Every structure is written in structure tokens, then in C-alpha cells.
Image (tube, helix red, strand yellow):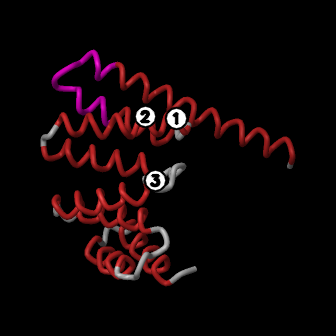
Amino acid sequence: MRCAARLALIGSSYYGLGKYDSSLVYLKKALSYPEPWGFGWIALLTGRTQQKLNNDSAAFNYYYQSINELSKTINSQDLPGVYTAVAGLYLEVGNIDSAIHYGKLSYTFAAQKHFNKEAMAACLLFAAAYNKNNTTESMHYNKLAMMANDNLFSAERKNQLVSKKFN
């Protein structure tokens, strides 16, 4: 494993522990390497860390870097996650239209690639964005989120049954 990836994993661990300042130190070191492996994922995590530290402009900057990098990889499962993160940050700062725009990008990409977990997250974000202004749309996206959730757990149940059958 490359050094930048190791540093990013350490940063990810600190993020999981809620130690965002420590996480940021390691993530920034990882990003300092020329063209680090996994740059899109590292930038995404750095954006999330900046968001936790209430550095919204820095978070947006890292999110957009992540989108640029992950867009080069057509089948990236991280791309809808970045779109959802950007939409969530726009929702936090009160820019509902931008939140809905990025939420739609997330949902469209996730649905096309059958990423049920990401589709469910996008739908829940839509429901929150539409909640105040349009209860019909909010209900629609809540239903879609529940369908994605059901599909996600249905796939997990199938895997469990298959593994029991062959054990």
C-alpha cells in the first residue's frame, strides 16, 4: 500500500473516533503526495472533516476536488456519496435549490449503478430538503428511500441464505 493511502487510513480512523483535528493532519499529509492513490476518496473524507470542523468553504473546495477526480472513474461508488455530502452541506447553509440539484445528481448516479445504500441516502436528503416547502415531494422521496432500503436488505438476506446453503 502506498504511503498516501496509509496516511489517509489513519486520518479515516481518527475521523471515525471523532478526532477531526487529528484526522485533518493525516488527510492533508496524504493529499500532499503527488497524485496520491485514491485522491477522490481522500478529498471526500477531507471535505467531510472540514465540514465537521465548521469550515464550510474548505469543505466545498475539497468536495469539488473529489467530484472532479471521481468523475474520471465511471463506476465510482464514492461519487454519489460526494454529491450527497455536497447536497447536505448546501442544506445546512440554507441553499435548498443547490441541495436538491446535488441530491438529484446523487440519486440518478446511484440508481443507474444500483447503489441502493447511496440511493437511499439521496432520497432521505431530498425528503429533508422538500420537507418545509413541498410535503408531496417529501413523501415521494421518503417512499423511494424505503424502497431502496428494502432492496438493500433483501440483497443482504439473499447473501445470508446463499452462504448458509453452502456452509
Numbered mark located on residue 112 in the image: 1
The residue closer to the viewer here, 129 or 66, is 66
Residue type pointed to by label 2: Thr
The magenta stretch spans which residues? 125-139
Q: Is mark 3 on a helix, strand or loop?
A: helix
Q: Nearer the viewer, residue 4 or 48?
A: 4
Q: Does the magenta stretch include residue 22?
A: no
Q: Which amino acid does label 3 sit on?
A: Asp
Q: In which quarter of the image is residue 124?
A: top left
The residue to which callout 2 is attached is 108
Q: In which quarter of the image is the N terminus?
A: bottom right
Q: What numbered label is drawn on residue 78?
A: 3
Q: What element does badge 2 sit on?
A: helix
Q: Distance between the residues labelled 1 and 3?
A: 14 Å
Question: How far is disc 2 from disc 1 in space, using C-alphas?
Answer: 6 Å
Q: How crowded is mark 2: few (under 14 residues within 10 Å), some or many (20 or more)?
A: some
Identify residue type, mark 1: Gln
Give me the residue at 42% from left, 68% from top: 39
